[in-house]
Image: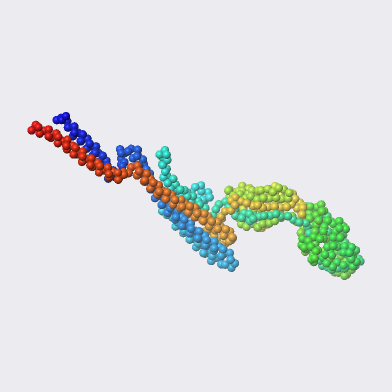
Amino acid sequence: MTSIMTNTAAIAALQTLRSVSSQLSENQNQISSGLRIETAADNAAYWSISTTMTSDAKAITAVADSLGFGAAIADTAYSGTQAIVRVLDDFKAKLVAASEPGVDTSKIQKELVQLNAQAESIVASSSFSSINWLSTEASTHLMETQNLQSSLVSSFSRLANGTVSVETTDVNLKLTSMLNRGGGGILQKELWGVGDIGGFRSTGINSVAHQGHESRIFTGPASFATGDYILFDINVDSGDHSAGLDFMGLTIDKAVVDSALGITTGEINSADDMRKVLQAVFTANGVPATAYEGLFSGGLGSNLFEIGSRETSGEPGSSITISNVTSDFNGAKPAGFALGLEGPPKDNHDNMYPKASIDFTKPFTVSPKSEIFFDVQVGSNARQTYTIDRTTVDAALGTTDGAIVDAASLAAVIAYASAGSALTVTASGPRLTFAADQATFPEAGNRAARVFVGNVQSIPPWALEFDLAEIDITGDRFTLAEYLTGVEYMLQRSIDGASMIGAVSARIQMQTEFTQSLLDTMERGVGRLVDADMNEASTRLKALQAQEQLAIQSLQIANSSAQNLMKLFS
């Protein structure tokens, strides 16, 4: 039906044209922007995801920049640490050279001063954008500093619940700092050390004694005729705690000599003969002594004869004392001649008690965090460990600073700490002597109480006691060996620091590579969501352009039929 009111065909053609034009406009937008989803109206879900991921990608790009910054800081610190290692190598070589006899240490000291200045210059220069891992500004010593970290941004992450976070790589600058304002850097002294404990650290005493004895030079030979004699008294095992036993009027004459030696001539021709004769006299008179001692003389075959206590007298002492020596050889020998019994002995050990000594080296301080441990055993007592800490030192010396300044103060502290062990510690000048308390153990010689003092340890076991800048080989504060040990310690800590920085650098490099890979992956992922397929879009464009032309022609045809109808009324 043809109507003058409504052109149905034109309306249909116009609707088709509008639809094709809309699709064509959308397709042209995709081609011009390259995006399939450009606004939230295109696809709200995909647009939201892509917008969020694009924002995250920008944040990750910032992380990549931060990683580059961190890599520069780490590389600078690593280069500085390597340079410090080389300086310490040279320092160690100079100290070894200074150990050679005849070397002018003052000249080497000048070189050491310059090496230290170079180390300080390296530390100060190892800075990138005002960040220096080798020079720190903590006001406290690093051993008393709780936290000293430098943080590098290393990653950006979004959790499942939508929250975001920035992760960091933390570097403990207590392990890299060479010089700290409050002390404690690798090139600076540590705290709480007690050094060689004034010489006590190396103590390893395991002291025992032996019987009282004395040696005498044989002054013979001599021939005893009838009526010739030597008379003498002997005291065995007298000492501070007993009078010993006295044997009076012991006699050597021709009969004694002939009997002891199995001869008839009364001749004593050697020190060995004298030993036999004396032993016969001791046996005959019940003297608890032996003439066959060899601790000084080495035994038979020398020009010495030696007398020792058998320690069977029941007295706590262990000694030999010869006195009141008289003789008569009817003019054949000078007055007082007694084959070596006359006069003082050549060597003499009476009432020996186990003891040992050490020399005090230098003052030290027991800090509130220091402890010293040592073992003591006296006589049959069980071995026991004793402790010296700051409280012990101050209680023993009546001080408040924990300082032990000389041998007397160290002796007082050790004695105080080991009270009840029966150990005595006395000081004479710079020397400390350890012995058993004779009030508890009065026996001397072989029966005397064994004394053990040793296994000396400390917390900390060892600590660096000087800065690199304080090394002075022309002074006597520390020995060359101690300086060498300290520099080696600095060297090893520097190497450890370089290893740690190198590990951080490697991690930064790995994280940088991962971040770049992550950015590429995110870009591809977002592209899959919102990018237009240009091949498909261009093909669709041609089709829509053709559809548009057909729709226009259809509209023209529909409009032309209405015009033909109007001609009927003209």
The N terminus appears in which quarter of the rendering? Answer: top left
- In the rendered view, tell whether residue 231 sits above or below residue 374: below
- In the rendered view, tell whether residue 504 sits above or below residue 346: above
- In the rendered view, tell whether residue 494 sits above or below residue 221: above
Q: Position of residue 322 (x, y in %)?
A: 82, 60
The C terminus appears in which quarter of the rendering? Answer: top left
301 left or right of 31 in image: right
Which residue is depicted at the point 14% across and 36% down?
560
Residue found at the far left of this picture: 570
396 left or right of 154 in image: right
- Foreground pick, 143 / 24: 24
Residue found at the far right of this picture: 226
Q: Position of residue 142 (x, y in %)?
A: 51, 50
Res 311 → quadrant: bottom right
Which residue is depicted at the point 48% across and 59% down?
83
What colouring method underlies this structural image?
rainbow
- Foreground pick, 90 / 347: 90
358 left or right of 351 in image: left
- In the rendered view, tell whether residue 311 sits above or below residue 50: below
Residue found at the far bottom of this picture: 332
Label count reads 0
Which residue is depicted at the point 52% across and 62% down?
90
- Foreground pick, 239 / 22: 22
Q: Position of residue 264 (x, y in %)?
A: 90, 66
Residue found at the far front of this picture: 1
- Foreground pick, 370 / 94: 94
Residue 235 in view here: no
Q: Position of residue 227 (x, y in %)?
A: 91, 66
Residue 266 in view here: yes
Which residue is depicted at the point 31% across and 44% down?
533
